[in-house]
Amino acid sequence: MKLMKISLFVLGLATCVLSCNKDDDNDDDSTYEVRDRTEQQAEDDQILLDYLETHYYNASDFDGSNPDPKSEDVVITELQEGDVLPVGHKLIIDDVITKDVNFADTDYKIYYLDLNKNVDPNSSSPYFCDNAVTNYTGFTLDGSVFDRSTNGAFNQDLLNLITAWQKVIPEFHTAETFNENADGTSNYVNHGVGVMFVPSGLGYYAVGSTNIPAYTCIAFSFDLLQMFENDHDGDGVPSHLEDINGDGQFTYNSAVDVFDGDDTDGDGIVNAYDGDDDGDGVPTIYEDIDGDGDPTNDIGKNGIPKFLDPEETEANYDVDTTL
């Protein structure tokens, strides 16, 4: 069995209805042809490179002189044959950052612009499994907008969104601070601003979504405003620390008695959703021996945290800890 990204449907998590959601409803009951991912990625990457090499943006508005840049200020324009780049503009390919990603046993390249030069590098960055508060606009490469955040900022668990968000948003920083307005909205100061350019394999791939055909490359401009750390199983261990193999996604072990994924006890449940990570009958939350709310620093005799060691069954509370 190959490593597989865990299905949030199987885990029973609720999904939102916005188009950056990876489970966005599609009313077409047709059977979809699933293409070879490696071949499709090669095609998508060429499409994205052609786009990045022939489109420019208003770079001078994001050179650091603007103290409060926003994603809504980004203007992307196609450079027509024979035209000259306007002053203050740059081809996207000249500024874009490339990130290599392995997903579904396929090597992908995802491209993004990091546009706020003044962002505080000490501000928080979410992990792939945290909640992120953003403003965003989703658009296809022909410039058609298929979705945008409305009625204020969009707060969502990144695990509920398409894979591209889990890979790119953690590269950005949240606002230094924010102020609450009388109407319930907030003003965010000096936050991450970016645009991501997404191959179909990190988007909606074979299924597509509302207004997005299957195998379509897409893009999102976004502001990263806040983040909230998640502990999906409430065991006292932040979910990002339960990515045991450190690959930036939750994966099952590749075979029985092989522990190369994020399922320490091999019970078919990754640690981020398993209340007893080591299968010793003691819930992880009770293996916080020193009672500081953090089981990760309670190291046992074998040199690893007790919540990951089935030989360590000491509980912190005088209760029935059997599952």
Image (cartoon, helix red, strand yellow):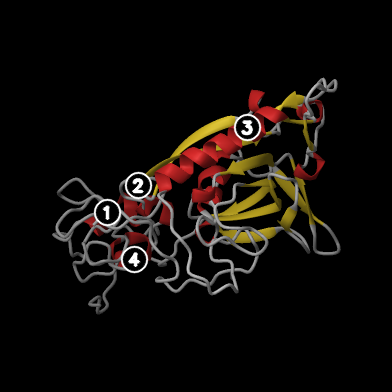
Task: Give the quadrant of residue 75.
Answer: top right
Question: If you read the primary sequence from the N terminus, does the residue marked by circle 1 or circle 4 appear first?
Answer: 1
Is the residue marked by circle 2 packed among few (<14), some (14-19), or many (20+) residues within 10 Å?
few
Q: Is residue 288 left or right of residue 232?
A: left
The quadrant of the picture occupied by the C terminus is: bottom left
Residue contact between numbered discs 3 and 1, judged by CB atoms under 8 Å: no
In this figure, which residue is indicated by the disc labeled 4?
285
The amino acid on which the numbered mark 4 sits, given as a three-letter code, is Ile
Q: Are marks 2 and 4 in contact (CB under 8 Å)?
A: no
Q: Is residue 189 above or below residue 21?
A: above
**Which circle's residue, 3 or 4, is located before the other in the chain?**
3
Q: Which residue is mark 3?
A: 50
Closer to the chain start, of discs 2 and 4, is 2
Kind of residue at badge 2: Asp
Alpha-carbon span between mark 3 and mark 4: 51 Å
Q: Secondary structure at mark 1?
A: loop
Q: Circle 2 is placed at which residue position? A: 105
Secondary structure state at the residue bearing disc 3: helix
Looking at the image, is mark 3 or mark 4 nearer the viewer? 3
- Counting from the top left corner in percent of width and height, residue 89 is at 79, 25
* Discs 1/4, front: 1
User: Circles 1 and 2: CB distance less than 8 Å?
Assistant: yes
Please state which amino acid type lies under the numbered disc 1. Lys
Q: Of residues 319 and 241, which is closer to you in this image? A: 241
The residue that label 1 is drawn on is: 2
Residue at image position (48%, 71%) is: 13
Q: Residue at x 77, y 60 (%)?
A: 152
